[in-house]
Image: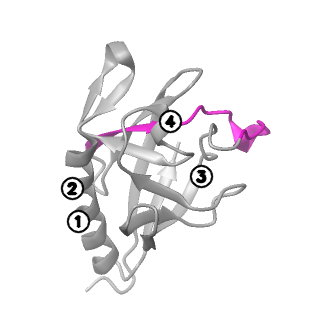
Amino acid sequence: MGINMTVEIHLERKEFYQDRTIGGFYDDTGKFRWYTLEPTDRKLEAGGVKIANLTAIPRGRYHVQYFYSFKRHGLTPVLLNVPQFTGIEIHLGDVPVDTEGCILIGDTYDAPNKQILASDQACSEFYPYLLEKIIESNNQVWLTVS
């Protein structure tokens, strides 16, 4: 039962705007599953400057675990050891103000408005998927952001 198994999931940033970054979330088989919305990509890994709550995390590979979020009143996926950031969660939301620096996921994408939709549906799919992978891998789930 997965003692030495590592699960790799992927977030690929695809569209870059002044106030948001749109991407795609791929599961451990490489299949596209959900749309993502993050704050502005300021390319921190290349020396960009962080603006609190308005900057996407640096590209990289991050350990993902569940923690209790007092703000969200439940277990929430959190990325660990993100340079210059703490408390980066994957949670509900549709527009940039909802990110608070975190990663939002949605089932659909409204391209004209550059907005993800059906975030509640995406979270209701993603959270159990992630929990299953955490259990299967003995807590070895990693997210690569590119």
Is residue 74 rendered magenta in the image? no
**Location of residue 81 in the rendering, given as x and y in whole percent from the top left corner:** 63, 66
Observer-nearest residue: 10 or 92? 92
What secondary structure is marked by label 1? helix
Residue tagged 1: 128
Residue tagged 3: 60
Residue tagged 4: 97
Observer-nearest residue: 4 or 65? 65
Q: Is residue 124 left or right of residue 14?
A: left
State the CA–CA distance, disc 1 to disc 3: 24 Å
Q: Is residue 3 left or right of residue 118?
A: right
State the CA–CA distance, disc 2 to disc 3: 26 Å
Q: Are marks 1 and 2 in contact (CB under 8 Å)?
A: yes
As drawn, the label of residue 124 is 2
> Which residue type carries mark 3?
Gly
What secondary structure is marked by label 2? helix
**Location of residue 2 in the rendering, given as x and y in whole percent from the top left corner:** 30, 82
**Location of residue 92 in the rendering, given as x and y in whole percent from the top left corner:** 35, 48
> Which residue type carries mark 1?
Pro
Which mark is nearer the camera, 4 or 3? Answer: 4
From which residue to which does the magenta span run?
32-51
